[in-house]
Amino acid sequence: MSEELEPKTNPWKRRFAVLFLIAVALPLLLGLILLKRFGGDVPVDYANPTEHFKYGSTGGEHEMGFPYWIWRALPEVCPQYLPGKGYQSLGMVYEKNPDGSERDVPVGTSKRRFQGIDRVFVNCAVCHVSTVRTAADRPPTIVLGMPAATFDMKGFEEFFFRCAADPKFSKEYILPEIARQGGDLDLLDRYLVYPIAIAIMRDRVLALAGRFDWVFKQHDWGPGRVDTFNSAKVIFNFPMAHLDPAEFDAPADFPSIWRQRQRKEPKEMQLHWDGNNTTVEERNKSAAFGTGTTPPTIDIARIKRVEDWLLDAAPPQFADFFPVDRKLAERGAPIYKEYCAACHSASGSDFSGEYVGTVEPLARIGTDRRRLDSYTYTLAVNQATLYAGYPWRFTHFRKTHGYANMPLDGLWLRAPYLHNGSVPSLRDLLEPAANRPQAFYRGNDVYDPVKVGFVSDQPEANGRKLFRLDTAVPGNGNGGHEGKAYGTDLSTDEKAALVEFLKTF
Amino acid sequence: MTTSCSCKTWFKAIGLAVVVVAVIGAMIGYDRGFREHPQPDWVTATPEMRFKYGSIGAEHDAGVPYWIFYVLPRVFPEKFVQDGKVAPGGYAALGVAWEQGQELPVGFTKKTIGFARVANNCAVCHTTSYRVAPDANPVFVVGGSAHTANVQGFFRLLIDCAKDPRFNSDILMAEINRVTDLDSIDRLLYRFVIIPVTRKRLLEREAQFAWIYRPDFPEWGRGRDDAMNLTKYFMIRAPMDDTFGPTDMPSVWNLKKYVWDQGHRLNYAGDSHDAYSVVMDSTLGVLGAPPADKAEFLAQVQWLKDYLSELPPPKYPFPVDAARAAAGKPLFAANCAACHASARTGTPLPLAEVGTDRGRLDSWNKGAAIKANQVVRDMGLERRGLVEEDLIGYIAPFLDGIWLKAPYLHNGSVPTLRDLLEPAGQRPKVFWRGYDVYDQTKGGFVSDTPEAQRVGTRLDTASKGGGNQGHEFGTTLTAEEKDALVEYLKTL
């Protein structure tokens, strides 16, 4: 049988080969090329843990990432929605390249090539890095782990929603801007990938706009603050317009994130301003939602690197920036021990103390209640569904009824004070609420070593208009943490000594 | 010869391949569609945990696929409605008892039968939430009335979602893929089988549940259900009538107090002979179908009956004024004991004697009882069952744990004990049910503060089935005597 057929197969063999080439080999090759072009999932990586903290990925780019060149182009496409030039005007921190030019992306953003396009989104550092200047004419020092005191998160969110809704958010405006900035997009990018990406991104952002509509209706948070747990309600798509109005206007300062090990060992502290979670890792994953992560897309390994680094990261010392009067500080030590230590720990590095890391009932602490009320029992139980199906499903969120006593490591960099940042300096905090500034400016990175806090009486810094915080606005109340037990009745000398001692934290 | 031989080999090979594929397919199908996995150990670690989270077998027919259940609040937040208003908070907005750190609320069970499913058990209607103050977290008492649970809201929610055109595989899968990483088999199953079938099954409920959408009936609101109509329309498939008998979810602790041969009957109108029958019938109601495994079902019913028989009523957790309570004791003996601490307790009293709202009584009848008993018998299940007699009125209830059984009367039409001691004309005409802060003065839940109005559902006592008349006993006592009586009642 085979002998008979053989002569006939010769032409067929060739035809078959051609057919194979067209039907199988070529598509396969094309497929491989496309796979290589669009298949990868590669984040930028840095061996150095601090570089990784500043620019490493949490995985948020998968779901939320902006195509790199769109990210770069938007401030020029929609300048009217920014307070000034570039993301710098929102208080984002840019490092310098060795040649003196600014880096292409600010601290707190990461890059990942996913589905064939470089994407940019924020990471932990966007809210936990800032700058300090010892005087207005001195260069800024970038401090990792401190609250992002200059970063205006509300402005950041609003910028993207406004820009996506703007007619200029189209390839006709964005692509030329990319070209102007030197983005040498290849043909595929220019004619296919970016036009589609722009359309998809506009759809995405606008689809999310409804979920973030409430943000526009809040009193401005200003730099250094975020309404953490109303933002968390967005994860569940709570119908925000129907929430109890008492839950809104709940801005809180970004926290510092040093010395996490001591917050979990020897005993687990109640973390977050209201102490609603006692597990560092769970708290971290919860915060990572803010960097755009979702359970399937979070980059656990890279978050773990940040997590590990934070365990022992320590704040810079005040004394490295300004002199400390050691004698005066010594006089402040016993005052601190008598008044503060039980709740705020023995020192900036020794976190022992009877009430450290536990919640103080609101009736006792008396500070603004909105942040507390924004975190509801309803939210707490819903959070227990997060990461369902994963070994690290959230199980530790609890509704509390007060604010947590925090250890004071790096206290000097954590101004303004109280959970809502309603008191500009430590010295002001030692005054009764009525004598604290009724209004002041936030977002300056020039430091006031006398009052211990950032300079708060200037409406502008570096040409950037600062945010005027009015303590009469809902959520901004500067009451509480006052009375004899809180040191507001001390003499002026004692207060000076106490403040001097606090500089050693 | 060679040709046929090679053909045969080919056929054999193909046949074998088909068989192998079919077997593997069937194994995967069985594994992902039907294979039953026991719940994790923590669920059955203690009797209380088992009561709260243990499966009673409802996942087979009434179960909602876990990931659909999970994403419904995110996809359809506007369908969580209470008193006509959107209620934020996902399932928590329906007033379920939800312990912090738990993946599901009390009374919601998760079990994998091929794929993870969510269904209910008894605890969803029989767990009480109370708080000692507005700035306190809730305490959950198992076996108590779920006065916060909006059961009708939950029934409607599932149907309303299924009716929405956005209940489709594209939209639900997009949301599911945002919260978990299903493997490809589960993805395919969800997209092409589980989501479409779930939608179909939920839509089938719409016809059965037609009466819960009746615009001429008031909503059940928090803590009430139209229990006997549920039985009528589901178990015996009776045609819809105009009766409406909303009642409070009852407490089910201490069931051993009911003694059949002393004439004690169960359910508000004495509709059922004994606790075992009630447990079985209620369990069947939650299952929504004949049990998948009869022996397992009977063991479950027996366990529930035994557990609830011995479950003690909760002690009043606040201070009691001992002197005042002592003064209330003789008042109780004189005014209450004849019905509530006597041979009459636990037995039906003629309606005319008590005079409370007759809606619940009219929603059930002898004919329905006979049919329902037949349905259960046909499943091969033995029990004394429902009382096949004309019903005369409501049971005089035992008052164990009465402090936590607010609101009062069978239809929960009186918010507090103190209000119940007022003549009907002076009881609150409108109040809000299902807020869980306890009112230690009046004995009941706070029912009219702005917060109660925001959280709770409005009850108008002029609405169908919601009348607050009757039981005008002790209403002529002095204010001081009434306070003393309420104080004594806290000790029961």
Image (cartoon, coloured by chain):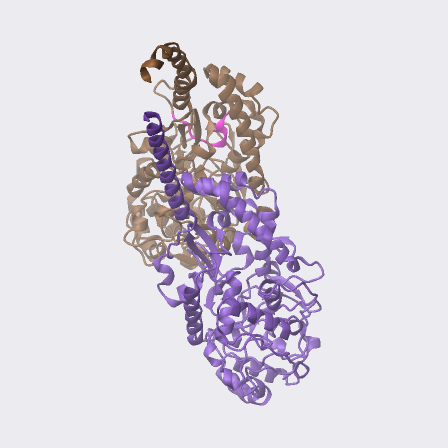
Residue B40 position in % (x across, y down): 36, 57
Where residue B239 sits, quadrant-wise, is bottom right
Chain A, which colour?
Answer: brown
Judge by depth and name the residue closer to the eye, A343 or A233.
A233
Above or below, B237 relative to A90: below
Instruction: Return the residue found at the far front.
Output: B1
Judge by depth and name the residue closer to the eye, B314 or B223.
B223
Q: Is residue A94 magenta?
A: yes
Above or below, B53 relative to A145: below
Where residue B364 sits, quadrant-wise, is bottom right
Above or below, B235 relative to B388: above
In the rendered picture of this protein, how many numbered marks are placed on residues? 0
Residue B398 position in % (x across, y down): 53, 80
Q: Please tell me whether the stretch drawn in magenta is mainly helix, strand or loop.
A: loop
Above or below, A115 relative to A428: above
* Identity of the residue drawn at 46% across and 17% down: A183
Residue B87 seen in the current view: no
* Identity of the residue drawn at 51% across and 78% down: B490
Judge by depth and name the residue closer to the eye, B379 or A241.
B379
Judge by depth and name the residue closer to the eye, B388 or B53.
B388
Residue A27 position in % (x across, y down): 42, 19
Magenta segment: A86-95
Quadrant where the N terminus of chain B is found in the figure: top left
Chain assigned purple:
B
